[in-house]
Amino acid sequence: MAKIVIIGAGMSGLAAASRLATLGHRVTVCEAGGTYGGMVGRYERDGFAFDTGPGLLTLPAVYRDLALKTGKEPLEQLVELAPVDPESRHLFPDGTAVSLPNASRGGVSQALDAAFGAGSGALWSEVMNRGRAVWEATRRPLLEEPLPADPTPLRTDPYPVPPRTGLARLRKPVPWTLDTVARRQLGGHPGLTALLGEPALRYGLPPGQAPAGAAVLAYMEQSFGVWYVKGGLRALADAVYRRCELRKVEFRFDTPVTRVIVEEGRARGVETADGRIDADLVVSAMDTGALFRHGLADWPGMRPEDWEPVEVPGRFSVLLALRGPRPEGTVHRTVVHAADPAAEENALSLSGPPCERPTVQVLRPDDPALRPDDAHESVVLTATVPAQDDVDWTAPGFADHYADRLLAHVDAAGLGLRERVLWRVVRTPEDTRRETGALFGAVAQPVLAGSPAPSSGLKAANESPVPGLYLIGGGAHPGGGLARVGMSACIAAGLIGPA
């Protein structure tokens, strides 16, 4: 039996703790804050409840595996899962609307033909076939296995780009982005272009910077489905925490780690304000860059200043408590697309002010657990906004003004929310950073091979250069997002092995 200290009780820390304790190890989790879950937070007031981080679950197989491996129970016995159908409704600037069925590529193709004209579905399906090729090429090495000693081959975008012909063969090849795919394989159709870029944008990747392989994000959602956890995603964090308690994991909240103790060249525990905690192994679930930049641990051959943060877009949310019942026929997820996609791209790529009418995700779950009664409704608006250092979200009135702009934007698309608002809470990237320590309150970024953007390159390997120190979470392989941080915990537990 090894004594293991985990730094951080976010979802990766909880997943790792439950897995390692099930393997027979003695696990202690040190969390700087007063609760668990990290980005999977919750806000409650007057009988209303809201997820303050992600609101939907993709690749539920990751947490199904966690449930079975740590307790021999299906995930559905721990939380109530429901497929989101339709998966989403999209509203475009020209007034076009399209609803996409959940986990039905054939149904999506038919819906696109009906909305955009015959042949649109075939174009989309062909790009999704290429997304499937990316999934098949990257699923194991980029999501399920530890990084190899030489990860160089994984930096090549596996998107199957057509061979160059004619004079194009004489020119230096330029990496394809999602915008390139949209221009060359979707005919530049504005609606199809917006649909292709929206999942990447949600992860903080502007389509003009996201590699062509980011088409896999749309493929995964449309192939494997999107799911809602009844009671909100915080219920998933509660379930994994309960599993940790069942496996006798010790939690120390309000206990920030100030240093990873390294003796004789090996991690031997952590220092906290309450003193030293000895351990045989240390697993860090905190932001990897912050771990080394703040001097909590040393990376052989690198200095703290070498870990300067890369500015990435963040998440701006408006939590709406509405009077009046949820209208019949309301879909769970509506996406109001940017009025000017080029302006949105520029705002996110060129360090400009936030786009006035950006792409906004509107989540309206039909869940009695999130509202005081059926005469009210809880709604969350979310937009991807420029990096924290580019916008002063703490400036008086700035965040409220931007929330007004988002409400006006979605209401112009026909949602009619403003007149029903009882109260609202505005959350900026600064709120997320203060509560979770996430850099810039960033949206979670996945690993995408071949990306021209440094912030979306390969993450740090789970087995650090310091013997006995392992890295998990959004800053480590395989990257950010609820499914991926669960995978990072699984990979690390596999590297450590049973007691």
Image (tube, rainbow, N blue to C red):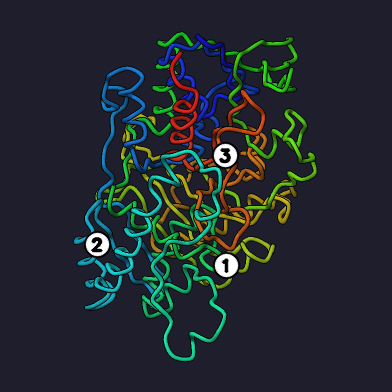
Place of residue 257 in the rendered image (x, y in percent of width and height, measured from the top left) = 70, 21
**Labels 3 & 1 near each other (Cβ < 8 A):** no
Give the amino acid at mark 3. Ala
Q: Considering the numbered disc 1 on the image, is that residue within a helix, a strand or a loop?
A: helix
Question: Of the residues under marks 3 and 2, which one precedes in the sequence?
Answer: 2
**Residue farthest bottom in this picture:** 167
Label 2 crowd (10 A; few <14 / some 14-19 / many >=20): many
Label ID, residue 108: 2
Label ID, residue 345: 1
In the image, taking residue 15 as reference, residue 440 lies left or right, namely right
Image: 209 above or below 53: below
Label ID, residue 461: 3
Q: Nearer the viewer, mark 3 or mark 2?
A: 3
Q: Considering the numbered disc 2 on the image, is that residue within a helix, a strand or a loop?
A: helix
Q: Which residue is pictured at 51% across the width and 37% down the height?
A: 52
Distance between the alpha carbons at the discs numbered 1 and 2: 26 Å
**Labels 1 & 2 near each other (Cβ < 8 A):** no
Q: Which residue is pictured at 51% across the width and 43% down the height?
A: 148
Label 1 crowd (10 A; few <14 / some 14-19 / many >=20): many
Image: 134 above or below 96: above
Distance between the alpha carbons at the discs numbered 3 and 1: 31 Å
Label ID, residue 131: none
